[in-house]
């Protein structure tokens, strides 16, 4: 007779993922591999701007060879980060370069960090990519650690471009546009026109994306609602829902996009 063993994996709370991300980001920022590496994305907003949205990954901008930087960071993860996370937070872990169809982009490289403790498992993708920056990098601090990051304008403009250029929309980008749209500058429309030209992003593609957001509003509002439920601080999620939830966020993001996007 064979016996069956069922393994139950506990879903990690966003706060626990956030604890791990902060350790990883601190160690990257204080290592030679982190020199001139710019922290970007949702976790940058969480760490440096007290965003009320939890992030699922850690993103960096690198202006050089992405494959070489991926290798440096993978070595750092295996030599330093996994051991420090074990000592500081009690998690065992592994790090691997991502392979497969979703790892073939010429504009991004990924490292998959996995941590586990008892029956809890947490995955944190670490992405190295390239965004267009018109401003010099800025220095920011978190808990005494210095992080290099793009300007506020370059970062929020990169969110606009992500909404326009991704094959599949990541609705967390629309939430970040709602949260940090006030970081756009009076000349952001002109700046975005420069960036769109450098990316060779066709105006017809931009128009189709904006049209899709408008014509399939119910779908996009529901997807934003899921981000609110899964990635926002609980009290903030209640406030957002009281103010219209996913539909209100979508409408606000669309208003912003319509104002600054090249047409």
Image: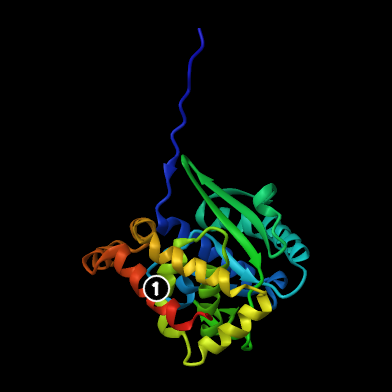
Q: Is residue 48 above or below residue 171?
A: below
Q: Is residue 253 above or below residue 217?
A: below
What residue does disc 1 label? 253
Q: Residue furthest top?
A: 1
Front in this rendered view, residue 83 or 256? 256
Residue 121 placement (x, y as % from top left): 50, 45
Q: Residue at 76%, 73% (x, y): give it.
A: 64
Determine the image quadrant of residue 39: bottom right
Front in this rendered view, residue 132 or 251? 251
Residue 223 placement (x, y as % from top left): 39, 56
Residue 137 placement (x, y as % from top left): 62, 85
Q: Residue furthest front?
A: 204
Q: Is residue 256 left or right of residue 150?
A: left
Q: Is residue 195 above or below residue 73?
A: below
Q: Secondary structure at mark 1?
A: helix
| Number of marks | 1
Residue 171 placement (x, y as % from top left): 44, 62
Residue 67 seen in the figure: yes
Q: Residue at 43%, 83% (x, y): give it.
A: 259
Q: Residue at 49%, 59% (x, y): give it.
A: 56
Residue 43 seen in the figure: no
**Callout 1 crowding tier (Cα within 10 Å): few <14, some 14–19, many ≥20:** many
Q: Residue at 50%, 7% (x, y): give it.
A: 1
Determine the image quadrant of residue 140: bottom right
Q: Is residue 252 left or right of residue 189?
A: left
Q: Residue furthest left?
A: 242
Front in this rendered view, residue 206 or 185? 206
User: Is the image coloured rainbow, by chain, by secondary structure, or in one colour?
Assistant: rainbow
């Amino acid at each position: 007779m064979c016996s069956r063993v069922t393994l139950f994996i506990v879903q990690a709370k966003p706060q626990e993922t956030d604890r791990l991300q902060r350790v990883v980001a601190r160690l990257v920022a204080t290592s030679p591999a982190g020199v001139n590496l710019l922290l970007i994305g949702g976790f940058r907003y969480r760490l440096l701007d007290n965003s009320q949205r939890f992030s699922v990954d850690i993103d960096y901008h690198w202006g050089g060879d992405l494959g070489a930087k991926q290798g440096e960071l993978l070595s750092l993860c295996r030599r330093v980060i996994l051991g420090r996370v074990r000592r500081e937070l009690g998690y065992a872990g592994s790090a691997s370069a991502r392979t497969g169809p979703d790892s073939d982009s010429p504009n991004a490289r990924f490292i998959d960090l996995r941590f586990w403790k008892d029956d809890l498992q947490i995955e944190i993708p670490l992405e190295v990519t390239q965004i267009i920056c018109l401003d010099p990098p800025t220095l920011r601090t978190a808990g005494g650690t210095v992080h290099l990051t793009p300007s506020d304008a370059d970062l929020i403009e990169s969110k606009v471009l992500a909404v326009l250029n991704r094959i599949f929309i990541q609705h967390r980008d629309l939430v970040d546009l709602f949260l940090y749209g006030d970081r756009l500058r009076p000349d952001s429309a002109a700046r975005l026109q420069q960036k769109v030209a450098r990316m060779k992003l066709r105006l017809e593609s931009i128009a189709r994306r904006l049209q899709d957001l408008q014509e399939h509003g119910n779908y996009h509002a529901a997807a934003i609602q899921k981000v609110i439920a899964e990635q926002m601080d609980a009290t903030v999620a209640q406030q957002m829902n009281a103010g219209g939830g996913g539909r209100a966020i979508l409408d606000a993001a669309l208003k912003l996009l319509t104002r600054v996007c090249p047409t």
